[in-house]
Image: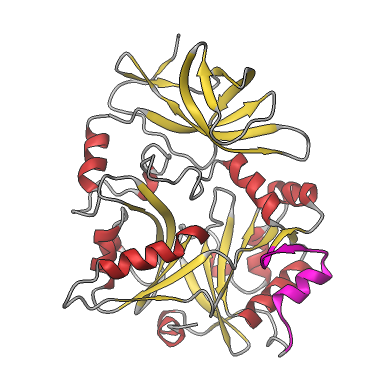
Amino acid sequence: MKGNRESRVFTRALELDIDLPDIDLDLSSLQDDQGAHIEDGIPVSFGNDTEALEALESGVVIIDHKHWGRLRVAGEDRLTFLHGQSTADFLAMQPGRGCSTVFVDRKGRTIDLALCLIQANSVLLLVSPSRRKALLSRLDQYIFFGDKVEVSDVLEQTVQLRVAGPGSDGLLQSLGAAGLVGQPEGSHAVFGAGSEPVVIAVGSGFSAQGYTIVASEGAAAEFWQRCIKQGAVPMGERAYEQARISYGRPAADNELTEDYNPLEAGLQTAVSSTKGCFIGAETLSKLNNLDAVKQQLWGLHLAASAAPGDLIMDGEEKCGKITSFTTLPDGQHVALGYVRCRSRGVQVDLEGKQVTVNGGSARLVRTPFATHMEGSTQAVKDQQ
């Protein structure tokens, strides 16, 4: 992976308790042996969706997200450049730290939510699969003459894994990465796996406790194998999608689109209110200062099946739209959707509100991931 030498500057040659990968060890072969159903290189399921969802709640899972995007931003002006391109305060970041940030357009509409890892001489951006090429093109477009910035795509040189669940701290400790336990999201270090580097960052990508790992193919395969031996349950993409919706993590092409802004998506913690100018700042600042957010992303528990695009109704009146839907292994129907959150000019508390979708009953619920704006006025229960 590019940038290995620079990263070792501030990691003090930390070592993981895993062996040098075998020359013929590859991740797909391990997953085949574990019963993975793979489509387009992505493990859809290991035939254990119920077990994996239970392990996410009470144990630890490991997820293969090698199809997620990974971009490297280098050059002397990299932090100033990224500071102006997204919502986080990059100028306050130090090597070994990181943050979530939102890339938005000039109208403040969402492009993607990214995890950024600040290394000694570069920044690693972990982005959604469908946004990698667009963000690479966008960042290249905003590099002006004289800017000392280089952006490269490191997807092919790396693999991205995630471990999540209450047992993830113990798993990391058993592998020799105990120093990351209890650190803020985005904190990371580079460890050695034999002669190969492994970047481990705090944060699972959604609100479940966990870590994100970026490594070469061989080191990632060895890491996967060691985690499985330590009791981690492999989770396929189908179960991950069910967990994502249950936890309320917005996804590109569903909740993260040009139809919505980060404040509506519950991404307040990724939007700095004190930094200087950035693309979309004027709109987001106005929405925040004037308490002008009109809709919010909420979870829904439904009595019947639904689909993205279905309307959410409050009596005879449309009040929102479904953006993601899934049925859990236990038969429970859950969804995410944007719902109008103002009544008579006042922000209302929607928690527990009864609505209908396709004529069936549904209830609005808070999700662990979203952080809703409380507004400048006291939120009140909607009595309508």
Q: Give the residue displayed 73% in from the left and 83% down from the top.
A: 25
Q: Which residues are magenta?
A: 24-42
Quick one: which residue is furthest to the left in this view? 146
Where is residue 222, by image quadrant? bottom right
Question: From the viewer's perspective, is 354 left or right of 31?
Answer: left
Q: Can residue 128 be seen here?
A: no
Front-most of residues 238 and 18? 238
Whether residue 78 sits left or right of residue 180 in the image: it is left
Residue 282 in the image: x percent, y percent?
20, 44
The C terminus lies in which quarter of the figure? top left
Determine whether 70 is above or below 335 in the image: below
58 or 216: nearer the eye? 216
- Give me the residue at 63% from left, 67% from top: 172
To which quarter of the image does residue 98 belong?
bottom left
Q: Is residue 40 magenta?
A: yes
| Place of residue 122 in the rendered image (x, y in percent of width and height, measured from the top left) | 36, 76
**In the rendered image of this protein, does residue 146 appear above or below residue 341?**
below
Residue displayed at 76% across by 59% down: 233
Which residue is located at x 65 percent, y 82 percent?
A: 218
Q: Position of residue 300 (x, y in %)?
A: 58, 29
